[in-house]
Image: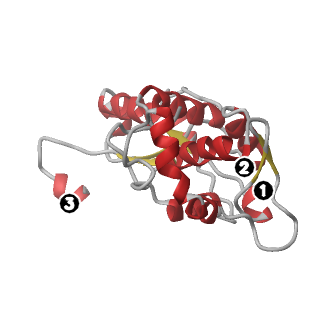
Amino acid sequence: MLRASAHKPWTFCEIRPDAIVGFVPQNNAMNIAQALGLFLSLWRAVEGEGSTVGFPGSVEAWEAVHTDTSQDILARFHIFASLAPQETSERAFNVVDGPATTWREVWPEVCAYFGLRGIAPESSGAPFSAQKWMEDHQSEWAKWISTNGLKDGALEGTSWEFMQAVIGIPFRRDYDASASRAIGFEEVRAHAEGYRLAFDEMRRAGFIP
């Protein structure tokens, strides 16, 4: 980019999010919030309100530190960066919702949105697979969609493998956002809140009841 922009009337800024938590109305197969929202909604329909949902990953993934990035915080940093070229030109910035978190902190809150109780993974044996659970209950998808008047195609268009892969990351991957904070971008949000906002949008769009 430095070479491409040399002697040109434009410059650039590299913006780096972690896993983007958000919603798109036309479906997105590789969307962690969409996949979790559909999985937990169907779980509630099948297993009942108040039921427990084991974390679909290993103990290492449960404890691994990470940072999510809400779509609107990411969008607002793009605007912020474009309006402050003297601070952002030819630089790279990590953009995250807030201080690092773990699934131990986020999973119970994400499940609570659906009236469910999120619990820790088993300490031994193979981790619970949300991907396999969704595939095993595929015969119930059509009735669930019809009964609740939901958008067709979202379940079929979601990558459960992607969901399982993101949730199952067993190593630390938190981003350092000190550079974006240092130039005055101070917006923060609890990581679970980003999921709740995405689920609200999914409800309004008829992806989940």
Q: Residues within 10 Å of mark 3 (few under 14, many from 20)?
A: few
Q: Earlier in the sequence, mark 2 or mark 1?
A: 1
Q: CA distance from mark 2 to mark 1?
A: 7 Å
Residue 26 in percent (x, y) is at 32, 41
Q: Residue at x 75, y 67 (%)?
A: 127
Q: Amino acid at mark 2?
A: Trp
In what quadrant of the picture does the N terminus appear? bottom left
Q: Nearer the viewer, residue 181 or 128?
A: 128
Instruction: Find residue 80 and report its image quarter.
Output: top left
Residue 103: which disc?
2
Dots 2 and 1: beta carbons under 8 Å?
yes
SS at mark 3 in the image: helix
Instruction: Find residue 196 and report its image quarter.
Output: top right
Of all residues shown, which one is farthest toward the left? 8
Q: Along the horizontal axis of the image, is 190 left or right of 55?
A: left
Residue 55 in percent (x, y) is at 74, 54
Q: Which residue is mark 1?
A: 63
Q: Residue at x 79, y 36 (%)?
A: 50
Q: CA distance from mark 3 to mark 1?
A: 42 Å
Q: Nearer the viewer, residue 27 or 149?
A: 149
Examine the rendering and report whether any part of residue 46 can be seen.
Answer: yes
Q: Residue at x 39, y 54 (%)?
A: 157
Q: Which residue is mark 3?
A: 3
